[in-house]
Every structure is written in C-alpha cells, then in structure tokens.
Amino acid sequence: MPERRVILKNCGVIDPRRMETFLNNDGFKALTKALNEMTPDSVIETIKASGLRGRGGAGFPCGLKWELARKAPGDEKFVICNADEGEVGTFKDRYILENDPFSLIEGIAIAAYALGARQAYIYLRAEYHYLLELLTKAIAQTKEGGFLEHVDIQIREGAGAYVCGEESALMDSIEGKRGEVRYRPPFPPTQGLWEKPTVINNVETMMNIPQIVLNGADWFNQIGTDRSKGTKVFSVAGDVDRPGVYELEMGSQLKELVVDLAQAKKVKMLQIGGATGKIIPHTMMDTPLSFETILGAGAITVLDESRNIVDAVYHTMEFLAEESCGKCAPCREGTEALFGIMEKFNRGEGTERDIRHLEDLANAMMPSSLCGLGQAAPIPVVDSLQHFRSEYEDRIKQKQGGAAK
Ligand SMILES: Cc1cc2nc3c(=O)[nH]c(=O)nc-3n(C[C@H](O)[C@H](O)[C@H](O)COP(=O)(O)O)c2cc1C
C-alpha cells in the first residue's frame, strides 16, 4: 500500500513562512466553517463520530476528552498542544511543525472554539527551539489574518525532560514548576492546567481536526480499521536505507512501512513506540499497524542482524533511568535497578539469577508506577527476554561483555 497523505498533505507544498500559500490550499476553511456554521457542541459531536483517537501514544478518544472538558464546570478552560516529542526515535511532530504550522494552529483554534477556551498553549520540546521563530511568526500571521479572535495561542518551551511529554508533568512545567507526574484522578479535562478544565492533545491529533471538520466524520470513518480510524504518521529510523517520516492508512502492514517505504534490509528486530515501546522480531512484520495491535506514538526503530538485543536494551534502560522524574519509588528505583542489571550484562557478569531479577522487577514496576514511564519501562526487557532470551543466555555462558558504550 502506498503512502496516503492526509495529515502531511501540505508538507512540501506550502511555504510554512507564508500564510497566503496555506490559504491557497484550503487553509482556514475548516476553522471558518466551524466558527460560522457549527456550534461548539456540533464540532464535538463530529469529532466523536469520526472515531479519532489521540496520536500521542495512549489512543484516547479525542471527542470524548473534549466533551468532558466542555461539560466540566468553570468559565476558564485551556487547550494545550503537546509538541514535546521526547520519545526516542520520534520526529514526526517536528516534521509537521517545520512544514505545516498553520494546519496545527487551525486545529488548536477549532479545539479552543469547541471547548470555550480563550487561552491555548503549544508546549514545544526544548530541542526544537529552532522552530520557535517559525511558529511565533505563523501565529502572528494567523492573528493578523483575523482567524484568532476567539483565542490567544502562546508557546511554552520545555527544558529538556522526557517526562514533561507526559501530560500532567507537562502542565506542571507550564505552571513554572519542576515537571513531575501528578496523582490522578483528577484528570486534565476536569482539573488540568492551574486546576482548570484542560484538553491536551498531541500535534498529530490536532492536525486531524481541520480535515475532519472540513470533510465530515463519515469521510474520516471510512479510512483505517474498525477501531483505528484515519491515517498514522510514522518516524522510521535505525538500520534502513530511507529513514524518514511516512503517512499510511491505519491497518497497513509493518513491512509495507519498513521494507517497502523505508527500505530496510536484513531486519532482525523492531522497536515500536520508542524507549518504552514493544520489541518484536522480524517474523512479525505482517502485523497491521493499528491501536488494536501495535502503534504507540509511531516511532519505529529498525535493528538489523548486526545488532545484539542486550546492547539495545542496555541503551534503552540507561535512557529511562536517567529520565525517570523520581516522584514514585517503583519507577525511580526500578529503572535504576533494571539498568544496573543491564550494566552487569554489558560487563560480561550477567547470571541466570539476574534474568529472574529482571523479570521480578518488571512484574513489580508495571502495576505500581505512577505514570506510563515506569509502567512501560520494563517492556523492552520483557519483550527481549520473550523473543531473544538466547542472547542473554549466550552472554552468561561466554561471560562476554557487550559492545554498548
Ligand atoms: C513518559 C511519557 C512521555 C510522553 N511524551 C509525550 C510526547 O512527547 N508527546 C505526546 O503527544 N504525548 C506524550 N505522552 C502522552 C501524553 O501523556 C498524553 O497522553 C498525550 O499528550 C495526549 O494527547 P492525545 O490524546 O492527542 O494522544 C507521554 C506519556 C508519557 C507517560
């Protein structure tokens, strides 16, 4: 199946520095339609009927989130666009921000109208500082064009923490606090930023909004699978000839993306969804890409036959131990302990007992950690032991260290 460009349709077509090029490509038609022909409730109904699910990783139904926030009591509400994109191997949001900032602004402006929010924020990954000027200018042009009379959009820059992509830590960060995960409930739609009802959506989720408003829920509903509607934008990196950003219809096979488009050769394993994502062997390349199977935020890292799984997991655990926010003990201590054991394997000192410790730690961390970081941190360990256990065992037998570092 070839690429299907719905979200990326303007990328490489418009000039992201000139709003008139966006206007020439149906720009702000959806916002104009929403503001003039639809009530906030009918916008929400349309998004609900479309079946759009969040593209930031968890796949939460977008319309339902908006409805909860709209119905939550209070006059002051907020919209946040999550452009933190800290997941290892992800760069699809960056591509969107770089190439089509106006569609993103349009999506945010529609969300604000639907919610009754007069203030919106784009939380921009610290490493994307170079995009600040482009985005600021795009917002200014949109305002001058008269499209933002109902909402003010501001940019807040992150400070470089992976955990600040997690929605509650992100809101703490916007509030000027150290970014740490909050206890929940309450959830953001009822008590989010400054304890006010807040909708927080990923960049790619927001990009779907103008398309759905313009073309209708039925149109969107016909793309994708039963429970995963629309297209998905993927970042493919690692051992491939053509790394990059690709957009495919939901339900396309992994091999269509990785082999046909990204030109991977001699694939050994794939990490789907970043550092805390699933690791699968090449034999599972027929898997359809959807929320029902595997998806995450759409980061795919391909490792070829020259790679060793123990080295790959070592690096992942090093990252997660470094990035745990430290608020809850299972994640703070657990990620350090997992990394400590991976370090033993890297020195050639791993034992059978260490494998059991890895499994025990994983079982303890997953149900008890406060957020997705600690809950999912053991996944690479668990998956690698399930599919590539012999590589751990070889290291034990041969008392051999790794190539990591
Ligand atoms: C450790 C961690 C990091 C996250 N990083 C991001 C991120 O960089 N971008 C993002 O959109 N969502 C990220 N999320 C998910 C957000 O918490 C949240 O679910 C998402 O922004 C909601 O938007 P959506 O409904 O449009 O997917 C992260 C979650 C966790 C647990």
Image (cartoon, rainbow, N blue to C red):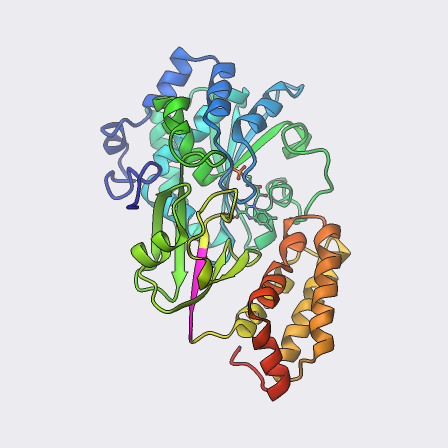
Is 294 one of the magenta-colored residues? no
Relative to 295, residue 37 above or below: above
At 57% from the left and 68% from the top, the residue drawn is 313
Question: How far across and down, in percent of the image, does residue 400 sit?
Answer: 58, 86
Q: Nearer the viewer, residue 284 or 375?
A: 284
Relative to 136, residue 111 above or below: above
Left or right? Give the position of 176 relative to 293. right
* Chief SS of the magenta region: strand
Give the total of numbered labels.
0
Q: Is residue 388 visible?
A: yes
Relative to 199, residue 294 above or below: below
Question: How far across and down, in percent of the image, does residue 227 sit?
Answer: 50, 35
At 54% from the left and 22% from the top, the residue drawn is 115
Q: Specify the segment rendered in magenta.
A: 300-305
Q: Nearer the viewer, residue 3 or 372?
A: 3
Question: How far across and down, in percent of the image, does residue 152 sit?
Answer: 48, 27
At 67% from the left and 34% from the top, the residue drawn is 187
Q: Choose top left, top right, bottom left or bottom right for residue 391.
A: bottom right
Left or right? Give the position of 138 relative to 273. left
Left or right? Give the position of 114 relative to 207. right
Image region (quadrant) for ligand 1: top right
Question: How far across and down, in percent of the image, does residue 376 sit?
Answer: 63, 54
Q: Is residue 151 visible?
A: no
At 37% from the left and 55% from the top, the residue drawn is 255
Is 301 one of the magenta-colored residues? yes
Q: Nearer the viewer, residue 46 or 397?
A: 397
